[in-house]
Amino acid sequence: MTRRLALAESLATRYPTDSEAFLQLGTVLQWDGLFLAAADAFGRAQELDRDGLAAARAGERCLACEAVDGRIIALQMTDSIEASIRIARDYTRQAPRYADARFSLADALMYTDRAEDAYAAERVAATLDAPERAALVRAFIAIHAQDWDVTAAYFTQEAARPEVDLQNRGVWWLTIIRRQQGRLDEALALARRYIEAGGIRSPETQVLFDRGEFRAAARAFRAIANEPRPELPPSSLVRDIAWHLTHTATAVAARRRELERRLGSH
């Protein structure tokens, strides 16, 4: 058990009727990868703030709303998509004029094949909130629906924005989109632009693999796995290392198959 989790559990034990205590416990459990336990803690936080959803207002903090959002994400992380959708729909019923509820429903639905339902939830949210936020959610729905032209148009505009954080987000997603479209030269250029801006190297290594540059990809994946990541908790660090080493092995195996094919053709 991490010290952070021990502290969060002690606060929830000491203040068993405090919604904030259980909200923080759910956040820590989720960060540590204990998603089912996190969903339970978020559920308890929501129960303790019984009137929160009905009183939800834009610009004001709503503990119950944060708890519902956390619970939806925790369930998504366990692949309990239908359960997350049921909770999100109940959220919209209890807070019908609260944009966050509609955005949460759109987010839950985008992980299914019901893209039109997700777009419908986003359109309602757009009438209740700033259109810029709705446009971003629409772009993410388009990614899951593989509406590449729609989402590429949005992130191309974002990559040209003067704000560095928006630029980087646009470049990140454009890299992924161009990979999915098979436009690998563009994807590689975008990935390298992302690195030059201080971003991580993982997108570049994925593109190298897709281009058949297996040796370079293996070396890059292995290098990333060996990089120190002090900002990550132990559980996340282990998953990150395992992810990159798995891809290292995949690239090595692909390189070996490529060499065998070349030898077999002679």
Image (tube, grey):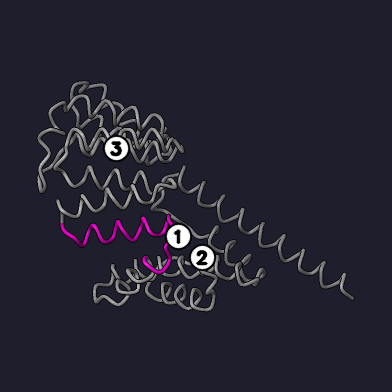
Estimate how packed mark 1 is, as few (under 14), some (14 to 19) or many (20 or more) residues with alpha carbons within 10 Å: some
Residue 51 shown left or right of residue 149 in the figure: left
Q: What predominant SS class does the magenta segment belong to?
A: helix
Estimate how packed mark 3 is, as few (under 14), some (14 to 19) or many (20 or more) residues with alpha carbons within 10 Å: many
Residue 110 lies, in percent from the top left, at: 38, 49
Magenta-drawn segment: 130-150
Any mark on residue 146, and which?
1
Residue 56 lies, in percent from the top left, at: 12, 39
CA gap between label 3 and label 1 equals 23 Å
Q: What residue appears at the point 48 percent right and 67 percent down from the top-left corner?
A: 201
Query: For this rendering, which residue is in front, 107 or 234?
Result: 107
Q: Which of pointers 1 and 2 lies earlier in the amino acid sequence?
A: 1
Q: At numbered mark 3, what does the secondary structure look like: helix, strand or loop?
A: helix
Any mark on residue 232, and which?
none
Label pair 3/1, CB-CB below 8 angstroms: no
Find out whether residue 138 is within the magenta segment. yes
Q: At numbered mark 1, what does the secondary structure look like: helix, strand or loop?
A: loop
Q: Which of pointers 3 and 1 lies earlier in the amino acid sequence?
A: 3
Any mark on residue 88, and which?
3
The quadrant in which the N terminus is found is top left
Q: What residue type is labelled 1?
A: Gln
Find out whether residue 202 is within the magenta segment. no
Q: Which amino acid does label 3 sit on?
A: Ala
Label pair 1/2, CB-CB below 8 angstroms: yes
Q: At numbered mark 2, what does the secondary structure look like: helix, strand or loop?
A: helix
Q: Mark 2 points at which residue?
A: 180
